[in-house]
Amino acid sequence: MDLIDILIEWFPYLISGIFATLGLVASALVIGVLVGLPMALGQVYGKFPVRAVVGIYVWFFRGLPVLVLLFLFYFGIFPGLGLDLPAFFVGATVLGLRGAAYQSQIFRGAIQSISEGQMIAARSLGMTRLQGIRNVILPQAVRIALPGWSNEYPNILTDSAICYAIGVAELLTRTSQIVSQTYVTMPIYLVCAGIFILLNYAGLRVLHEIEKKIEVPGFGTGAA
Amino acid sequence: METIQFISTILMPALLEGLVITIELVLITAPIGFLLGILLAVERVYGSRPVVLLCKIVVGFIKGTPLLLMLFILYFGLPSIGIVLSGFSASVVGFVMCNGAYSSEYIRGAMGSVKEGQMIAAQALGMTRMQAVRLIILPQALRRAIPGLSNEFIYLIKYSSLAYMLTVIELTGAGKLVATKYFTYTETFIVVGMLYLVLVTITTIAVMLLERKLAVPGMTTAGRSALDIL
Amino acid sequence: MADEEYILRVENIHKSFGELEVLRGVTFDVKKGETICFIGPSGTGKSTLLRCINQLNKPDDGHVWLHGEEVTNSGNRINYFRQRIGMVFQNFFLFDHLTALKNVEIALIKVRGMDPKEAREKALYELRQVGMEKWAEHYPAELSGGQAQRVSIARALAMDPDVILFDEPTSALDPELTREVLEVMKLLAEQGMTMLVVTHEMGFACSVATRIMFMEHGIIQEQGSPDQMMSDQTFERCKNFIGKVTGYGTD
């Protein structure tokens, strides 16, 4: 069995694939928060047009398959705008915009679960609405949302493999390249699956550690 | 107006053929996945220790592995050990595994929320454990699992697009072929996306109606909005 | 001259929620150092009146003046007035993600722009005033109702308000916990804090209030000092009400 030899020989390939995959996931999570959190605020505190726009955005990005979104942006929208963007960038953007649609709903639920009295108390101390959101609502919403948000990580991780379809050199792409070069299929695929499962487990551990770090009595974060 | 003509005469006919394949994939997968989900869930709750462990490993493996990788394993990997599947069959097998694994989690969770007294009362009436599971526990658990299961069904519609990566010309694949041939990516994938949105939205409405119909006083989930389901 | 004497003037406040007319023209003036207790059956607009004073509920009609400056229709300046008008709520409304200490200092830092070190000292001082210094690092979920309410009083005190509004501060508390909160409030009254208190605690009202206002059907029906209330004929309706709820004055 020369699997070990193959793995050693192609080790740099796998490592670069792992980094690309983690890069996709990290950018998707970051974009998800940066776009999803304001959307959630808009959906809760915004006027009707804002709520409608956010609602349509969420409907669109959650209703379309990842693969279709990737094709649409990589072959259609970005080139149509005259942008020749690297596949990695497109993959990260699509996963991020789609993640924002899902995450916005997690944040929205968290914000809506905060009792009205918190804002009333903030206003009674002379805070503006914006100060109340920033100092009182958001810190609580983030804590409430974190467990649900962490659960987005495995989804984004497994979805990131679909970026194979537009040629992002992530883990599945690298794996396929090794397979086509070595004609060893099953063992290599299983190694790839093992790496994904490991990344899944490790990432969740990190997120749960963060949950514990910012835990506050009275906010059950459910961190095991 | 060229675009409209392109869409109506070239794109739509091709897409509708693909759409039929997508619907076939979904309709074949869903019932088998559902049954697999029940089986995995029941075994994980009532099975012997090794069975529980085995189910746990299987579910963990399926959930942790990207679906696309699973499809590659089934389509490109299995022939190396003498099992050759067509793209369509490999897709169905992959979707069933994925759908079953995730569904089992919802069903298991719902079974856990059925009160302990239900099992005791059933056994007190002389039912065997299996009868009690079949007649008392599952009917309650499945009702509670409906929101999760319907989410999985909608995921299935969307993820069936991955069959294209195994050369199955379903909706996304049909779109890709037309788009490449006529170099009309944006229009094509917008239309493809709209068709998925139609499928998903119809399903969502159907799910909301189903939830209302199957609701039992006292164990009803509060009505969900469409955005919660999508 | 008269304007300077009264720190808070409330004039002809009206407020409806949909069809329901909750306040039907409430007028009164508050002198510095007064403790005014509002009593009366539930649903007669006492809490709404307090919220109309600091504009948490916008009155449909009428005016509120603080030190001769109009609080109603003050636009963005309302946030300035709310710093000058403290409020304590029935359900405390402590910020659940912050320790007792941080609950007290947050508005000092974020609203007043106070230096964090200075704010901390001030917050600790206020917690000491209400006997909660030892609990400074605890979160709201770790406090009893009485403790939480004392922290929320400290939070209001920290802003150095001209007047504090108490909206049924003990209604959510058990009798023993009620006592510790009322003692803090009594101390404040003795130190000369101006307070408007909506309460059902007749004992507190009679012993601490400088004036008692009996509200019913959205207006102030009767008012006077506790002594007047005990003796005066004009307090018929009020005594009737008190007799019903507590048995007080039935002998």
Image (cartoon, helix red, strand yellow):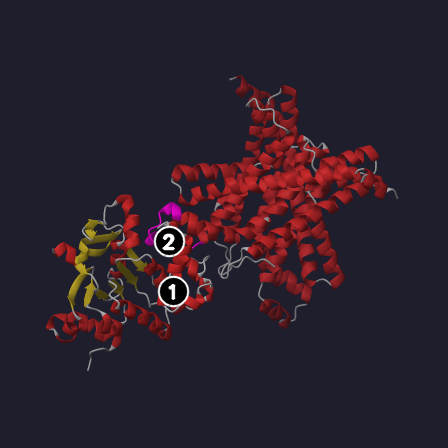
User: Of A91 and C187, which appears nearest the observer?
Assistant: C187
Q: Chain of mark 1?
A: C
Q: Which residue carries the number 2 mark?
A: C107
Q: Residues within 10 Å of mark 1 (few under 14, many from 20)?
A: many
Q: Secondary structure at mark 1?
A: helix
- Badge count: 2
Q: Going by the picture, which residue comes out furthest to the right?
A: A1
Q: Chain of mark 2?
A: C
User: Of C88 and B179, which appears nearest the observer?
Assistant: C88
Q: Main secondary structure of the magenta part?
A: helix
Which residue is at 51% across, 39% downward?
A35
Task: Please indicate whether residue C2 sits to the left or right of residue A122 in the image.
Answer: left
Q: Quadrant of residue C225?
A: bottom left
Which residue is at 42% across, 45% downward?
A44
Q: Where C229 falls versus B185 (above or below)?
A: below
Q: Secondary structure at mark 2?
A: helix
Quadrant (top left/top right/bottom left/bottom right) for the N terminus of chain C: bottom left
Amino acid on which disc 1 is placed: Leu
Amino acid on which disc 2 is placed: Ala
Q: Where C232 falls versus B190 (above or below)?
A: below
User: Of C29 and A191, which appears nearest the observer?
Assistant: C29
Q: Where B156 falls versus C99 (above or below)?
A: above
Q: Which residue carries the number 1 mark?
A: C127
Q: Estimate the x, y position of residue B153 in percent, counting from the top left.
A: 60, 45
Boundaries of the magenta span: A114-131
Separation (CA) of disc 1 from disc 2: 15 Å
**Is residue B177 a member of the stretch shown in magenta?**
no
Question: Are tags 1 and 2 found on a single chain?
Answer: yes
Q: Can residue A126 be seen at all in this image of the molecule?
A: yes
Q: Residues within 10 Å of mark 2 (few under 14, many from 20)?
A: many
Q: Can residue B100 be seen at all in this image of the molecule?
A: no
Q: Estimate the x, y position of residue C80 in percent, counting from the top left.
A: 29, 49
